[in-house]
Structures are given as C-alpha cells and as structure tokens.
C-alpha cells in the first residue's frame, strides 16, 4: 500500500498479521515463548522484541509516527528509561524542559546520580531556555509538549535544529498529543516516546509504552532494551493493536469535545482561567496551530475562589475524579493534590500550578452531558 495512507487506515490495518489458516478478520495471537531456530541468525523470543505480534504492532507504531522502526514496552516508563539510558553514559549530561511527567523527573532525580549521569531542567519550555542549559558533555535534549498540567507548547522545529547544531539526540514524550494530533519526526525530532497506557490504549485497561525513531537509533535502544527486559507480553500487544484500531476516531472525538468544553468553561463566570492550546488566547496558540493537527483532549482550568474545589469534585456525577488520563471516559484531578502533590506550595506556585487548578482529561461522552455535569457541579459548590 502507498506510504501516504491516512491515520484511520494506519490505525485499522498497518502491520496486521494475516490469518492464513482460517482467514479470520483480525491478527492471530502468537503466545509462544519458544520458537524453532530459523538458521543461526534468528532467535525468536518475547524479550528480544521479535515475536510475530510484537513485530506487527511495531510496524503500526512506526507508521503512526512517520518513523522507520519502533519497539513496544511493558510501560511508558520502560520506554522512557530505556531510551534515555541507551544514549547516556557516566559523565554525560541531558537537558530536560521544566514541566515533565512526574515519573520522568523522578527517574532523573532519584536514579541518575548512581549512573553518573548529569542533568539540568530548563527554566521553562522555550527553546532558548533549553539552549542555555547545553554544556560540553550534553548528549540528549528531552521535551514534552503539550506539557502537564498547563498545556504549554514547546517549539518542535526550534528544538530539532538546536539538537542538530549541537549534535544532540532530541527526544520527545508525545503522550499528551497522541500520534493523531502531532508527529514530531516531521519537524526533525529524533526519538518519539509514548505511554501507550494513555491514548493508544484509550480504555484505561492497558499498561504499555513505545518508542519510534530511525532504524539505527532503534537498533541502539534495542541493545539496551533486551538487557533491561522491559518488553510487553504478547497478549497485551494483541490487545493494544485492537485498541489502536479506533484511536483515530476516539482522539478526534476527544479533540472536539475538549474544544467545546474549553469554550464553555471560558464563558462561565465561575471559571477564572482555562488552559487549552486550541483557544486563541492561549499564549502558544499560533505555535500549536503550526505543529499540531488537533489540539488534544487535555485541558486545565481554575475555578473562581468562591467555588469550593473539593465540593465541586464530589458533586460531579458523570466526570470521574481519578488518576491517569486519555480513556474514553472523562476524568478530572487536582494536580496540587496528586501529580504535583509532593512539591511544596512555593514550588508549585513557581511552576504556575495553583492550588485549585483542575486537570481535565476529556472523554468521548456527549458534549451536552459533560457541559451539564460541569454546570450542575459548579452550581452546587457555590
Ligand atoms: C503516564 C505517562 C507516562 C508514563 O507512562 P506509564 O505507562 O504509566 O509508565 C509518561 N509520560 C506521560 C506524559 C504520561 O502521561
């Protein structure tokens, strides 16, 4: 098939395995952990990332992100840690943008010292601030856009050219955007990572991760990955393939819902501020328009001081206060009490995370039902 097929076709078909025996409509599942030798070269084993289902799904992942190759991991953090450690050794330095997924900043702050790896966090997500942290021993520049929880946008093209200029490997955690809304390789970014637990899985029932890049970079990550042992079980690989078939239509529905809810919340007099890259008054709206094909299903907002935030959360009937994100069901959380709860109030204030900031992962429910739920919960919490 031609290379330029559309996202929903990639989601549904790319990489699928043919059921030669029974002509079933879906990829057969190969659960074996032992395969007969095929010559001396090929040793097929799940931890080597080369079972039929792993290879098939990796083809879909590579196509989704316009890369050459991919690996599927047992979690997003397995993909993040293995990719970083594949390009960093003792004495090397990595530059991170400021607001990162908590697990990723914990990996650096809790583990890197024992490997002798140095790191710096830029003061914000701007390319110039990342540039200011580059040192002689810097090897990797690592970003995440849109960021959690304020949906700040990092300039992909500027970071890619910065990396080329300083001969660094550029990496992005593209989880929040999903491959439906943003393809960083098109802008020159080298390595794209996803927590597939989020939009790729999409139903809050799969833990997985993936990395997509060029053949040679994936080869390098693979050498570390087979020793670290973070591959995903074939049964879950198969489930993830099934989930991704609907990712295009799910995420587009989530984009649409999030956009309408962002507009509804902006117009509501009990809402002090809305953070959504699709809104014209978002500080990075123009940049988001340039590098994203949709603005995503994540938004954040602050209620007016007069609204009791805990009561608001309790009064929601449809939208679930809960951890994680990107499922078909809408969920909401308070970063100050959860993802950013370990920071001091002062540190949160420095990052612009107010105590009453709510992070909203918009699902695929009917827009009107979500609006009704938000309205009634606000009314009851005045
Ligand atoms: C959830 C998440 C991760 C970690 O993924 P796991 O699958 O939980 O290991 C990394 N980055 C982002 C942006 C995430 O939301």
Image (cartoon, grey):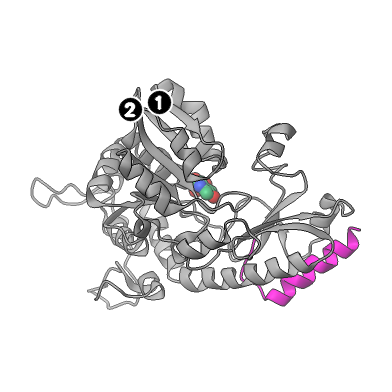
Q: Which residues are magenta?
A: 361-382
Cα–Cα span, label 2 and label 1: 6 Å
Q: Position of residue 295 (x, y in %)?
A: 55, 65
Q: Are marks 2 and 1 in contact (CB under 8 Å)?
A: yes
At a point 43% along the width and 66% down the height, the residue shown is: 244
Q: For this view, does 148 lie left or right of residue 375? A: left
Quadrant location of the N terminus in the rendered image: bottom left
Left or right of 88? Residue 343 is right
Q: Secondary structure at mark 2?
A: loop
Task: Please tell me whether residue 358 belongs to the stretch shown in magenta.
Answer: no
| In the image, residue 18 above or below residue 381 | below
Which badge, 2 or 1, comes first in the chain's sequence?
2
Query: Total number of numbered labels?
Result: 2
> Label 2 belongs to which residue?
89
* Among the 4 quarters of the image, the one containing residue 261: bottom right
Magenta span main SS:
helix
Residue 375: image location, x then y, percent: 82, 68
In the displayed structure image, the side of residue 256 where residue 318 appears, left or right: right
Q: Is mark 1 within 8 Å of ligand 1?
A: no
Disc 1 designates what residue? 117
Q: Residue at x 54, y 42 (%)?
A: 100
Front residue of 47 and 147: 147
Indicate yes or no whether the magenta region holds residue 375. Answer: yes
């Amino acid at each position: 098939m031609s290379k330029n097929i559309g996202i929903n076709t990639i989601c549904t078909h790319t990489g699928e395995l043919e059921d030669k025996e029974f002509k079933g409509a879906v990829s057969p599942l190969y659960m074996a952990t032992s395969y007969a030798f095929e010559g001396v070269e090929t040793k097929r084993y799940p931890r080597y990332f080369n079972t039929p289902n792993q290879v098939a799904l990796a083809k879909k992942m590579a196509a989704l992100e316009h890369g050459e190759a991919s690996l599927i991991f047992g979690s997003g953090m397995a993909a993040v840690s293995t990719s970083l450690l594949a390009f960093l050794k003792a004495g090397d330095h990595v530059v991170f943008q400021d607001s990162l997924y908590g697990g990723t900043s914990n990996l650096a702050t809790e583990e890197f010292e024992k490997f002798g790896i140095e790191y710096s966090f830029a003061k914000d997500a701007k390319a110039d601030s990342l540039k200011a942290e580059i040192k002689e021993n810097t090897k990797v520049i690592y970003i995440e856009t849109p960021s959690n929880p304020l949906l700040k946008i990092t300039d992909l093209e500027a970071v890619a050219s910065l990396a080329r200029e300083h001969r660094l490997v550029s990496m992005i955690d593209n989880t929040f955007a999903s491959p439906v809304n943003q393809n960083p390789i098109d802008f020159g970014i080298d390595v794209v990572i996803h927590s597939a637990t989020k939009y790729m899985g999409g139903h809050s029932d799969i833990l997985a991760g993936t990395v997509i890049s060029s053949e040679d970079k994936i080869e390098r990550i693979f050498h570390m990955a087979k020793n670290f042992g973070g591959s995903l079980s074939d049964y879950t690989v198969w489930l993830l393939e099934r989930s991704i078939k609907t990712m295009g239509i799910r995420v587009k529905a989530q984009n649409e819902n999030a956009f309408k809810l962002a507009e509804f919340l902006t117009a509501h007099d009990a809402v002090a501020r809305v953070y959504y890259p699709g809104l014209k008054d978002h500080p990075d709206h123009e940049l988001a328009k340039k590098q994203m094909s949709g603005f995503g299903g994540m938004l954040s907002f602050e209620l007016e001081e007069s609204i009791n935030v805990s009561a608001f959360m309790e009064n929601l009937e449809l939208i679930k206060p809960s951890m994680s994100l990107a499922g078909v069901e809408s969920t909401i959380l308070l970063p100050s009490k959860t993802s950013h709860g370990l920071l001091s109030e002062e540190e949160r204030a420095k990052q612009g995370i107010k105590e009453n900031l709510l992070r909203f992962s918009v699902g695929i429910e009917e827009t009107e039902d979500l609006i009704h739920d938000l309205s009634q919960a606000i009314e009851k919490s005045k």
